[in-house]
Amino acid sequence: MLRLDNVHTHYGPIEALKGVSLNVEKGEIVTLIGANGAGKTTLLMTICGDPRATSGTVTWKGEDITQKETSEIMRTGLAVVPEGRRVFSAMTVEENLAMGGFFNETNYDERLAHVLELFPRLKERYSQRAGTMSGGEQQMLAIGRALMSNPELLILDEPSLGLAPIIINQIFEIIDQLRSEGTTIFLVEQNANQALKLADRGYVIEHGHIVLEDTGDNLLVNEDVRKAYLGG
Amino acid sequence: MSRVTSAFVAALITLVLGGFLLGMSLTSEGINLVVETSTTGKMTVLFVGVVLVFLLQLFREQVGSFTSKMRSDERMELPSFLRTSQQQRMWTMFVIAGLVLFPFISSRGAVDIATLTLIYVMLGLGLNVVVGLAGLLDLGYVGFYAVGAYSYALLNMYFGVSFWVALPIAGGLAALFGFLLGFPVLRLRGDYLAIVTLGFGEIIRILLNNWTELTGGPNGIARIPKPTFFGLEFNRRPSEEGATTFHDFFGIGYSSEYKVMFLYLMALVLVLITLYVIRRLIRMPIGRAWEALREDEIACRSLGLNPTTIKLGAFTIGASFAGFAGSFFAARQGFISPESFTFIESAIILAIVVLGGMGSQLGVILAAIAMTVLPELAREFDEYRMLLFGLMMVLMMIWRPQGLLPMKRPHLELKRD
């Protein structure tokens, strides 16, 4: 479904991705783990076309999207929950969700109902300003907003960032539920333990290279991964 | 630093600054200038000022707690006669009717000022789209105003185009300039954007000033005809053979006031159209996109919105309203020169937007009235206008940093039945 072949990405003279190849199949949860500065977010941003890959190809649903505009890519059934939530803080929950459904007017009400069902919290806070909500609620809103475009692939960038463990559990449960509904998920996480438990497959990225690729369960018991990311 | 020390320092600064400004005066003695100390009256003012600053600084906390009560943080409820949308519509109609009747019951001077105010309302509403809604700080807005004014003036001078034909063209040309400016500056943000737009405004003014063959340079363009009422002129005698004047057509005596009233009503109609169009735009997806873009550009991109298009849209639409206002201004004044389009105009329009509360249309209208009517009323204090202006800005930042009527809906709650 989504495929990266030997992708290199540069920030000016700095090479952040040094030939990354990975693929995500339909219905999977695939996770990408790695330390700070390993290139996780860069990889994700490259998929979205900002920054563009300097070489290699990104293929989405059989189509080469490497050179496409970000705005075009984001309208083709791909949705991103950006790092740090980035909800529109002065807008209400309702308006935030409406922004998510900006380019997809069909079945708008159904999708809205579905999102509110997934996150009953958002229903309670429906006309509240997003900036006044807690971090967990904002994260739910960010995911809900992304879901409003009815994506086939949902890309999540560190959804557990800065949240309490109990909220993280809730978020991961939602992700699991989304998978059972048929949404493919690409999860970028630092919280390797939980991400790997949930994921079908995982990739480990280090210094711009994919160093390991295996099923989630295997990575979870892998000696190197345990040492590096799971605290021994 | 203790409070007494800081209050003392503040008072000292006041004394030094005020001492040079108020405490001394230059008098000419023959061909020489002599520095003299001022009259005791001025000295008293200075002394009182110093004491006042000292006391204010000393009791800052008490003053602060007093002023914080006046802040707009608490929820405001709409007055009872404005709760339902029906009532609101009724009152809007009422206000519009009042504005239409206004010229018939007030003096010519008042109508003139009102017309000027309406021009600023229009400019404020236009800039509000760019600054208030899309969050793009534009310091060169007056450039588009100039484009609009010169479009009509030049089209009329060279091709004899009438006002009503030139009006849409002026709007279109200004929009085109907005579009052209938008392209290079879209990648800029905040301060950098402000500087480039500032430069753009100046470029237009300097171009108009120096392209003497076309624009008449600093001499400006004179004798720009006033708009006509469905072809009827407002002159005492028709300007050319076969033309009819307004008073002849209706068989009433000539009065120069008709023209003033007509211009006012025209400005009113233009403002109402502007208001209506922008209100609609805000409620349309593009309006939501502007707000979202102001909030978070990255989130917008992640949702597939194209920031380039949205920003260009804001620039173009904002500029077109400046173009309309400009051509009306040219028609009203009958004379324009680059002098009318200096940076201070941009600053005033921006001040209207900030003062009114970014994004709030009603706020912008109130601020435009305050910014044009107050200086007119306080003509005697002309020299101190800038001083009062500064004072107002400082007080605003302390008491209502979000503007007179901030945009956000949660501050005003509608009771739903």
Image: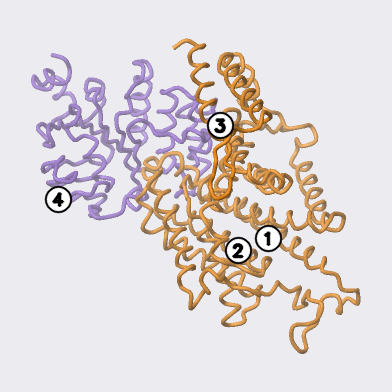
Chain colours: A purple, B orange
User: Contact (CB < 8 A) between labels 4 and 3?
Assistant: no
Q: CA distance from mark 1 to mark 4?
A: 55 Å
> Residue B397 has which mark?
3
Residue at 40 percent across and 50 percent down: it is B195
> Residue B270 has which mark?
1
Callout 4: 10 Å neighbours few (<14), some, many (20+)? some
Q: Earlier in the sequence, mark 2 or mark 1?
A: 1
Callout 3: 10 Å neighbours few (<14), some, many (20+)? few
Quadrant where the N terminus of chain B is found in the figure? top left
Q: CA distance from mark 2 to mark 1?
A: 8 Å
Residue at 57 percent across and 44 percent down: it is B351
| Of B94 and A104, the residue lying toward us | B94
User: Which secondary structure lies at badge 1?
Assistant: helix
Q: How many marks?
A: 4
Q: Position of residue A87 (x, y in %)?
A: 43, 34
Quarter-of-image position of residue B417: top right
Does residue A225 lie above or below B155 as drawn? above
Q: Which residue is mark 4?
A: A56
User: Contact (CB < 8 A) between labels 2 and 1?
Assistant: yes
| Of B337 and B321, the residue lying toward us | B337
Q: Amino acid at mark 3?
A: Met
Q: Position of residue B143 (x, y in %)?
A: 50, 60
User: Which secondary structure lies at badge 4?
Assistant: strand
